[in-house]
Image: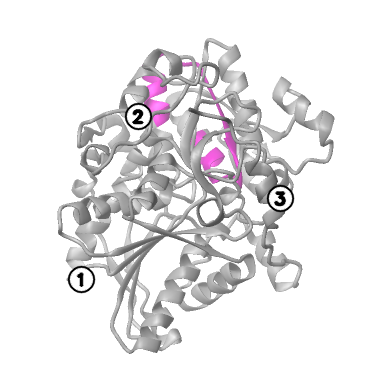
């Protein structure tokens, strides 16, 4: 069956990022200083981020210009293709039309470059010498390492221990781009040593790795911190995905009824969804917007929407988000990029406003969906992306049961070429589903900070 791609010329690379903040019916709750619990000012964030990114974090401008130097690098893979999954539709015997926006064609293999390039650019302009960061599965670390190489910056990556062991090729890719990669928790920082003193065999978590990376930046005036998800400016940079997808859906002559993205910190989901939510707020779209998270790390579906720290050691500001508690350490599932205790405040906010909804998917269901997709479409998705694939298949099967046409759009946020060990484990029957015990979630939530 013929593959149908909807490709835009390079002249259609977006010239601005789309900022949904000023269009929302209610404002985001402000981030709070970890010491005073008072709303943060720009100067409070200056030790970690260049002022240009701090201003983007709170901008009320509906559009923010993309620097030409960033667009020139985007041109290596943008506009990214959108494809209709005709063979998958046939395999599912569904009347649904399934489209996917494919971000795996970037040099680093995922959507993460959209913000990595921007953050490296602004830090270079600010005179930063080195960036420190964390990474889970390695997509973000790979992207930032590549972006730092492009702009002549040093890159220090703290990689969650379980992924460091599971995904050696991701680590190798970061090192090819010139990054220094350390398994987290480590003995290089006070934060890491404190964790290891209590849990010497800790598998690590994104919250722990964030603590280490933030500590390094806070102690070195020439180092800034770069985050691959969660914060507003990171989600802003990803909106090139949704802007292109709106044009590509128009090329296909359809409007999506359902828009889907996997969500760990929330950046690829937001990148696709926020421009469409902007259309919803203008009355130009009625699409359901669905964020999909792993059942083993269910921040939106089983967590609490409240203020919490973004890291385990409480070095970061407090933000209002869906959280499982900053001490929560998820099990070592293979979707390492989704193993975070919280969710982007902006994603949490639009879910709270009813503009989007959240569902969870078990690990075995996600891998089964990824294998089915690969056999039909010829692309092996990253384990994280498999969660979006699983929900797209579920929505297509609902359409078959109901006997109605439904147009589904999901973000295939990255390829799984560096994650084949997880597919080996899946086919060997070594993976299992994991439903996090309610008692352990309650215990982690009991430690939430008290904010008046």
Quote the CA–CA distance across marks 3 and 2.
Answer: 33 Å
Q: Is residue 328 visible?
A: no
Most extreme residue toward the top is 221
**In the foreground, 232 or 308:** 308
Pointer 2 residue: 57
> What secondary structure is marked by label 3?
helix
Q: Residues within 10 Å of mark 1 (few under 14, many from 20)?
A: few
Of the two numbered discs 3 and 1 in the rendering, the one whose residue sits closer to the viewer: 3
Pointer 3 residue: 440
- At which x and y percent is residue 54? 36, 23
Label 3–label 2 contact, CB within 8 A: no
Disc on the earlier residue, 3 or 1: 1
Magenta range is 119-144
Tell me, for residue 254, which label it has, or none. Answer: 1
Q: Is residue 369 above or below residue 342?
A: below
Q: Residues within 10 Å of mark 3 (few under 14, many from 20)?
A: few
């Amino acid at each position: 069956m013929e593959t149908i791609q909807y490709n835009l010329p390079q002249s259609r690379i977006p010239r601005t990022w789309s900022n949904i903040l000023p269009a929302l019916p209610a404002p985001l709750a402000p981030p709070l200083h970890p010491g005073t619990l008072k709303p943060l000012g720009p100067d409070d964030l200056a030790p970690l981020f260049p002022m240009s990114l701090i201003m983007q974090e709170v901008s009320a401008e509906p559009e923010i210009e993309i620097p030409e130097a960033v667009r020139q690098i985007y041109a290596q893979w943008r506009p990214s293709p959108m494809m209709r999954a005709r063979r998958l539709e046939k395999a599912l015997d569904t009347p649904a039309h399934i489209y996917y926006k494919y971000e795996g064609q970037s040099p680093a293999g995922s959507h993460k470059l959209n913000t990595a390039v921007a953050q490296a650019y602004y830090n270079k302009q600010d005179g930063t010498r080195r960036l420190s960061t964390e990474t889970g599965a390695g997509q973000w670390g790979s992207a930032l390492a590549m972006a730092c190489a492009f702009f002549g910056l040093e890159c220090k990556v703290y990689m969650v221990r379980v992924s460091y062991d599971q995904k050696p090729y991701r680590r190798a890719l970061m090192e090819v781009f010139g990054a220094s990669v350390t398994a987290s928790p480590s003995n290089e920082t006070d934060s890491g040593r404190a964790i290891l003193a209590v849990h010497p065999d800790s598998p690590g978590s994104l919250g722990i790795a964030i603590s280490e990376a933030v500590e390094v930046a806070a102690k070195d005036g020439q180092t800034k911190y770069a985050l691959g998800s969660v914060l507003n400016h990171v989600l802003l940079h990803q909106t090139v995905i949704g802007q292109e997808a709106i044009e590509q859906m128009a090329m296909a002559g359809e409007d999506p009824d359902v828009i889907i993205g996997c969500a760990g910190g929330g950046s690829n989901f937001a990148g696709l969804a926020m421009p469409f939510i902007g259309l919803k707020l203008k009355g130009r779209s009625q699409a359901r917007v669905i964020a999909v998270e792993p059942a083993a790390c269910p921040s939106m579906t089983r967590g609490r929407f409240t203020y919490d720290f973004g890291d385990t050691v409480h070095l970061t500001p407090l933000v209002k988000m869906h959280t499982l508690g900053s001490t929560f350490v998820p099990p070592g599932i293979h979707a390492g990029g989704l193993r975070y205790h919280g969710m982007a405040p902006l994603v949490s906010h639009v879910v709270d406003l009813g503009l989007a909804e959240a569902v969870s998917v078990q690990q075995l269901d996600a891998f089964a969906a990824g294998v089915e997709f690969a056999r039909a479409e010829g692309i092996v998705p990253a384990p994280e992306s498999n969660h979006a694939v699983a929900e797209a298949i579920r929505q297509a099967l609902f359409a078959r049961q109901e006997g109605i046409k439904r147009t589904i759009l999901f973000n295939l946020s990255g390829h799984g070429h560096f994650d084949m060990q997880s597919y080996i484990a899946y086919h060997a029957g070594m993976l299992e589903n994991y439903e996090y015990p309610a008692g352990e979630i309650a215990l982690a939530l009991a430690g939430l900070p008290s904010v008046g």
